[in-house]
Image: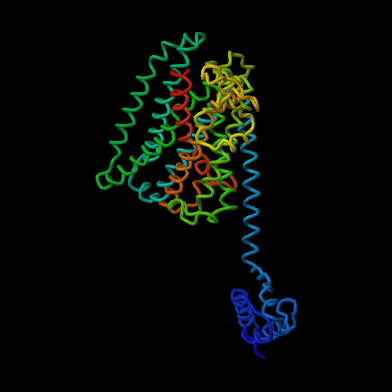
């Protein structure tokens, strides 16, 4: 007994979508490959199951066009959806745990935040250098002596040189630590000694048959040091200049990452079909734009909230293992102030539209004298429109937050694209499996590195002329 074809079913009055017909063919062919008894049972089940394939009487074209039954999901599609849900739940749980740990360390004090940064730098360096190490494991182990040793020696040279400068600055600015000045003066000599020793050992371990390969590995090590230690050189300054300059940028990048993801899955390629960037094909223009808009909004209000706490706004030069309440003269950028929106912007807009905006005041000149201006009074004959005025009650840090939000939205994502390029080049999905649902630390901190450097540049350019 043969299965009724899709053509015969159409003649009986039911239209079957092509993809549904393909599913029927696939499921029927699976029955054919089984035992003959199973095949017979499958045929009878197919013909008797009127709920899946009812033989409908002929209907008019208008009513038949509205019948479009939903295709059945295959077992593989169901498993894929369930796996996606589990992955999202795992990512959410891991994210909540990481945010909780982050808040706990922030509240513990500046020393512990610096310790966190140091541990992260070690793990980030390990993940990045391991990428090439695993690809060339056999060649390295058999022919190149002390390869991993010299890599880690370069790392600690960079760490010591970078943060010894910061430590010396802190000692000079803290009168309680002036007893350590004579030792602090030795830091440059120690850093140079470590550098020369590592340099000599690296050259001494080069093998004549593998010089090009070893130089490539050395260049990769230097690039990784620039990405990690180089971009985080001034992050300690951000911490001690006020924790807000460490916390706010991190939260802005997290916000941009989350909202870009949700904007992408909600609106991705529905308005702009052009590919966003080839390095990361899943990224969309809608996600990039949506993430930026939400980051600006969150940054504007989050900065105002954080400015209420002296723990965030006060700079310090104390190394305290047990945190104490910070008291300081709060800088003006953290105090609420009244500022006026540029009136020239209103000249570019229709008057009817401007009058609809809240808190906008129309200013008029009295008797044609432009030096005598006041708020316009409806019906006053001696008044003539002069300009519009909008007074905003704002905390100046909110303007800085807008700048940092733009950087987090427009520049920082390219750190993630660089990480995607590295993974694509070496054929890996994640840098590590340290964080369930997220991968490695580099998968989560790829955008944070350049953000930390950008924050320090912004602080020294627009907020302070010197750091702590």
* Residue at the image position 38 percent from the left and 33 percent from the top: 154
Residue 376 is situated, as x and y percent measured from the top left of the image, at 62, 25
Q: Is residue 371 above or below residue 76?
A: above
Image location (x, y in percent) of residue 117: 52, 30
Q: Does residue 307 appear to the left or right of 125 in the view shown?
A: right
List the single residue furthest toward the bottom: 1
Extreme residue toward the left, this view: 208
Task: Please report the residue visible at 41 percent of the width from the left and 10 percent of the height from the top.
Answer: 182
**Above or below, 442 relative to 69:** above
Q: Tell me the residue at 40%/49% (across/down).
A: 137
Q: Is residue 113 visible?
A: no
The quadrant of the picture occupied by the N terminus is bottom right
Q: Quadrant of residue 190?
A: top left
Q: Nearer the viewer, residue 351 or 172?
A: 351
250 versus 57 height, above or below: above
Residue 298 coordinates in the image, percent (x, y): 60, 35
Q: Position of residue 57 (x, y in %)?
A: 73, 84
Residue 427 appears in the picture as rendered: yes
């Amino acid at each position: 007994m043969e299965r009724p074809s899709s053509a015969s079913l159409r003649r009986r009055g039911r239209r079957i979508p092509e993809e549904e017909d393909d599913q029927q063919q696939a499921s029927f062919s699976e029955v054919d490959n089984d035992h003959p008894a199973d095949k017979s049972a499958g045929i009878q089940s197919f013909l008797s199951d009127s709920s899946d394939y009812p033989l409908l009487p002929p209907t008019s074209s208008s009513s038949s066009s509205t019948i479009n039954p939903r295709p059945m999901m295959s077992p593989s599609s169901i498993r894929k959806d369930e796996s996606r849900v589990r992955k999202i739940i795992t990512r959410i749980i891991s994210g909540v745990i990481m945010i909780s740990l982050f808040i706990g360390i922030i509240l513990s004090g500046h020393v512990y935040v610096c310790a966190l940064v140091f541990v992260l730098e070690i793990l980030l360096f390990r993940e990045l250098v391991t990428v090439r190490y695993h690809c060339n494991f056999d060649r390295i182990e058999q022919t190149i002596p002390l390869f991993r040793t010299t890599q880690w020696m370069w790392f600690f040279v960079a760490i010591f040189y970078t943060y010894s400068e910061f430590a010396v600055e802190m000692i000079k600015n803290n009168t309680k630590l002036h007893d350590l000045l004579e030792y602090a003066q030795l830091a440059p000599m120690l850093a140079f000694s470590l550098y020369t020793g590592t340099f000599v050992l690296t050259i001494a371990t080069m093998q004549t048959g593998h010089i090009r390969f070893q130089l490539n590995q050395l260049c990769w090590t230097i690039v990784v040091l620039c990405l990690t230690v180089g971009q985080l050189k001034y992050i300690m300054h951000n911490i001690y200049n006020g924790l807000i300059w460490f916390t706010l940028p991190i939260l802005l990048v997290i916000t941009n990452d989350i909202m870009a993801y949700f904007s992408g899955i909600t609106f991705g390629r529905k308005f702009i079909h052009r590919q966003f960037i080839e390095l990361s094909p899943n990224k969309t223009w809608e996600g990039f734009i949506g993430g930026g808009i939400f980051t600006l909004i969150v940054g504007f209000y989050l900065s105002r909230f954080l400015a209420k706490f002296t723990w965030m706004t006060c700079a310090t030069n104390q190394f305290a293992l047990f945190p104490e309440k910070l008291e300081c003269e709060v800088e003006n950028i953290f105090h609420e102030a009244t500022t006026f929106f540029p009136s020239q912007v209103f000249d570019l807009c229709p008057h009817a539209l401007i009058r609809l905006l809240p808190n906008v005041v129309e200013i008029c000149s009295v008797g044609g004298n432009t030096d005598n201006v006041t708020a316009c009074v409806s019906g006053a004959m001696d008044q003539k429109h002069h300009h519009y005025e909008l007074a905003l009650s704002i905390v100046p840090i909110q303007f800085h937050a807008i700048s940092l939000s733009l950087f987090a939205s427009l520049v920082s994502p390219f750190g993630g694209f660089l990480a995607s390029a590295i993974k694509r080049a070496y054929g890996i999905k994640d840098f590590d499996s340290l964080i369930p649902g997220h991968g490695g630390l580099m998968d989560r901190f790829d955008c944070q590195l350049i953000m930390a450097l950008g924050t320090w540049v912004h602080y020294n350019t627009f907020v302070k002329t010197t750091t702590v």
